[in-house]
Amino acid sequence: MKVKTNIKGIIIEAICLLYILLFVYAAVSKLFDFENFQVQLGQSPLLSAFAGWVSWGVPIVELLISVLLIFSRFRLLGLYAAFAIMTMFTTYIVIILNFSSFVPCSCGGVLEKLGWTEHLIFNIIFIALAFIAILLFITQKTDTNARKRQHLFTRIPVVFVSSIIVMIALFLCSEDIIHHRNNFIRRFPKHPTIFKYSKELPYDSYYLAGYDQGHIYLGNRTAPLVVTVIDTALQSSRQFRIDLPKNNFPFSSPRLKVVSPNFYFIDGTVPCVYSGSISNWKAKLRLYKNAYFSVFEPISSDKAAIRTIGSKSKERVIGIIDLANQHTLNLNHHLLEKQIDGVFDTDGMLLYNKQLDTLLYTYYYRNSYLKIDPSLKRRNVGHTIDTITKAQLKIAKIKSKGISTLASPPLLVNKNTATYGNYLFVDAGLMGQYEPEELWQKASIIDVYEWTKNRYAFSFYIYKRDGQKMREFMVNNMLLIALYGKYLTVEKLNTVDYKPWEKEQNNLK
């Protein structure tokens, strides 16, 4: 009997020693490479919302359990704790492999080189070892009565089930926080885009004017009347010249927009709007000196949304202009929310989502975007994941000239946008939590929002081309079209998180 007791004691000691080695090594590895560990947790599909305290809590708990396992007085408590935490780790892996939208890289430490399946097997073995050690420890205690032993045995399934429930609850809570109440933690799916094509252009003065099925339309700032049409495989290109009536207008910032089958040649400083068909590129004057505008976004062949300055308020307003009737201009002075001056603080980007017939206005300097119906009667607000709720601007007034200007560089929150179907793509201006700073020097970050549900979906990196960061982009169904300096690229969106066409009954909810 004494020999059996000694064997049990040796087995318990061996299992405790294995756990001590595992936890101490894992904890020290995490703490030595803490920044990387925190970044990996921040990108975890399960724990990203809790990456801050989990990144500290896990190594601390591992070290505390190791201390409990050293002393015989606290060894049973330590074994229960080891059993619980290994069950949590295993549940985490099971959820990642079976229920997560993407599988991240495994966290560092002792198991860094293992894949997730091998990691799972390793954890199950250690759960079994802890279970065996607990059973041996309970049966080894001769001074424990039968009722107390039964109570100790009952704790095992309770600890097991409780650990699983805690992990599932953390997962569900994290998902809700990330998608609806995000605390500026981005989620990066694995390989969200596939690089397809790249083309070097003759000059860096090209800009994206529009697209249709199979074609990309480029305007040129130094040759405003020249249109370059390139197929989406970037194999063939053609050039056309817009046939513009000789009105001799003093153009200062002419711009081309293509919404197939029509094109628009505009200059909000004249102001004037020409339009025509891309079949012959012959332009007709549709609007002249009706309203100055800084943004023009076509809605239909005869209707467009504009952003202008209110004549009385001297603040930015959004309006709808009827190109078939130049005298029809509908302005809504209550759509843009004034925070400071109503001009600089409400600056932003206006897009028309053709698939869901909705205008989207994204502020440059705060974490908000507006969803506006084309009649301008309804407006709803969505939020980007950063935490800048109020524009951080310093505005100086030059009384001698009667103008206002920015006194210092503003904090740019959203740099550029694109939309397709249910999604809004935002070229982000701010770094989120647990992100490696060096990547901001190498890439742009695109945050993707399912705007019909006020939901953050995911983010992805767009890396530099020839040392140039992306300066503008468009999204056409599954294709992301971008310009970097003189380079035009086409990438394919490749993630289950992106389902671009799911028509909603009420897209302004």
Image (cartoon, helix red, strand yellow):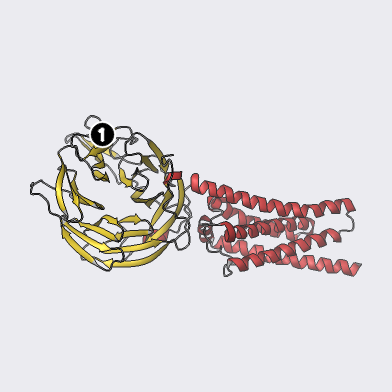
- Residue 477 visible, this orientation: yes
Is residue 257 visible in the rendered image? The answer is: no
Rendered location of residue 275, percent (x, y): 18, 48
User: Quarter of the image holding residue 401?
Assistant: top left
Q: Position of residue 142 (x, y in %)?
A: 89, 58
Front residue of this view, candidates 396 and 157? 157
Residue occupying the point 52% across, 61% down:
104
Among all residues in the image, which is located at the extreme right? 1
- Asked where in the image residue 509 lies, by quadrant, the reply is top left
Q: Is residue 261 above or below residue 202?
A: above
Residue receiving disc 1: 330
Q: Secondary structure at mark 1?
A: strand
Residue 486: image location, x then y, percent: 25, 63
Q: Nearer the viewer, residue 187 or 278?
A: 278
Task: Name above or below for residue 5 compared with residue 446.
Answer: below
Residue 94 quadrant? bottom right
Q: Which quadrant of the rendered structure holds the N terminus?
A: bottom right
Q: On the picture, is 82 further left or further right than 400?
A: right
On screen, residue 220 versus residue 381, left or right, reads: left
Residue at 48% across, 51% down: 185
Number of numbered labels in the structure image: 1
Residue flagged by tag 1: what amino acid is it? Answer: Asn
Q: Nearer the viewer, residue 283 or 313?
A: 283
**Residue at image point 46% right, 54% down:** 458
